[in-house]
Image (cartoon, rainbow, N blue to C red):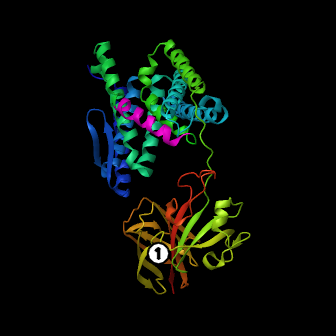
Amino acid sequence: MNRPPCSTRASRCCAWRAISAASAWRRQGTQTQAARGQVYFTLPLLGTVHYSGDLVWTFTRLTGLLLVGAVCVAMQRSQVRYPALLRAVFLMPCVAVALGMLAWQLWMHVPALHRAWNPDAPQHARQALLYLAGLCGVCSALFIVAQRRVMRLTGLAAAMLAALFALLLVLVLASWLAPGASYLVAWPLLAALGSFCALHSRRVRAWPAAARLALLVAGLIPAALLVPPALRDAYPVLSPLRMNLPVAMLVLLLGVSMLLLAHARRFVARALLLAGLTGLALAGAADDHVEAPPLRADGLVYYKDMPSWDAYWLHPEGELDPWERRLFANLKEPHIFVNAFGWESPRQWYAWAPRDGLKFPFTRVLRNGPAPERHADFTLVSENKAPEVRLRVIGARPTRVRLNGRTLLDTEAKTLTVVLYGMDDEPLHFRIDVGGDPIFSVRVEEVLPGLPDHLLPPRPPAATPLVPFSGKSIAADTLWFY
């Protein structure tokens, strides 16, 4: 039986949208540099799975095309209309943000619910997971209630597509900023989109209800395998300051499960709410809480400076305890340390320290170009394998900056500070073009957490314990270009 003309036009229109979207993704792909490295994650029974980082954007583009196809199918076969879809696109992210704010406010303003939070106590993991389970139960119940309200306004298909569209935006950001974690969104989203499209096909609609339910559950398997372990691992590490991140992972799991949650009975939300409140109450009623010893942040800095060929103990302006007073016995009050930081530096405590705590940054100037193409060309290697490397251009306006062949800046800037993380001891080749013909310098600092304890006097047992690795060590050098 032939389709009516209006259906044919709609099919052609949807196909044209899909082709246009594919062309847009292809053009974006030609402008995006390929990712590097490998993406690793663990699956039950299969062990570690990995694939090339070059495939991260490929999966992201494929997810975008599947979403375009899902929207076309839903508009043809589920009577989804643009106003309802736009309304759902606005409402579903608001639900996720509201749940994240609720979790954060609950942690900040109701400390009695997590009074057993003590990483040094042996029972901490059990109490932390109990609080997490209670929080997930409450948020899941509220998500189901909010989802039903949105479905009444927009319909199930529009609400589902809005949730998947929001997750696609998260996937794009993850592929750009954290490609190693993109698998956590990519695979659940691909499976959910594939299941959504399949359930709207005429052939699958003719299947028995049990077979359609099995297909729906199959689309949730990647989310069920990947999200809960990541949620569990992220919570003890990131809390209490990042309560919104575990909730974001929970919303990811709930977002791809909306088709299944839509058919849940009313008692499911009530049971989840009751279980969540019970978990929070049990976490707050823990009677085996062991009070953590008070800790004090260590503001001490070990600073090794190449231009002065010396090393120093530094401490911000403020009160010192008796142990720190021994280090700065040469000063009665903080002063401006002109020799190393100039007259515009803040007042601080300083004292000379042994030079064998760190290695100086290893730099090699390759070229010092004259005007009119004034530039600095040098390599940098962190022999300390510093997790953080800072560079700052002083006395010139950079016009173009390249690192290992990759452009970081291509317009004139008044100031420039480059911060690199996780470079280990990889050779870093910088080329910095500047305007005019100035005499300028590049300040290099390698920042490492912790202090060289073997250079410090022993801290008295009666003194307040310090937060581990709250102090830091810095190896600095200044390159001058004339």
Q: Is residue 365 shown above or below 222? A: below
Identified by mark 1, the residue type is: Ile
Q: Nearer the viewer, residue 436 or 231?
A: 231
Please say whether residue 80 is visible from this viewpoint.
no
Q: Is residue 253 shown above or below 234? A: above
Please say whether residue 363 is visible from this viewpoint.
yes
Residue visible at 63% across and 67% down in the picture: 327
Asked if the stretch drawn in magenta spans residue 465, the answer is no
Q: Nearer the viewer, residue 210 or 244?
A: 244
Residue visible at 38% across and 65% down in the picture: 425
Please identify the residue farthest to the front as the structure is shown: 461
x and y percentages locating residue 248 in the rendered image: 50, 36
Residue visible at 44% across and 25% down in the picture: 258
In magenta, the rendered stretch is 222-239
Q: Nearer the viewer, residue 24 or 93?
A: 93
The total number of labels drawn is: 1
Mark 1: secondary structure: strand
Q: Specify few, some or many for label 1: CA neighbours under 10 Å numbering under 14, 14-19, or 20 or more.
A: many
Q: Relative to residue 463, is residue 311 drawn left or right?
A: left
Q: Relative to residue 449, is residue 3 drawn left or right?
A: left
Q: Nearer the viewer, residue 360 or 291?
A: 291
Please identify the residue farthest to the right as the structure is shown: 333
x and y percentages locating residue 336 in the rendered image: 69, 73
x and y percentages locating residue 4 in the rendered image: 33, 23
Q: Relative to residue 467, is residue 169 drawn left or right?
A: left
Q: In which quadrant of the rendered image does the N terminus lie?
A: top left
Q: Is residue 344 shown above or below 97? A: below
Question: Would you say the magenta stretch is mainly helix, strand or loop?
Answer: helix
Residue visible at 46% across and 71% down in the picture: 401
Asked if the stretch drawn in magenta spans residue 237, the answer is yes
Q: Which residue is mark 1?
A: 432
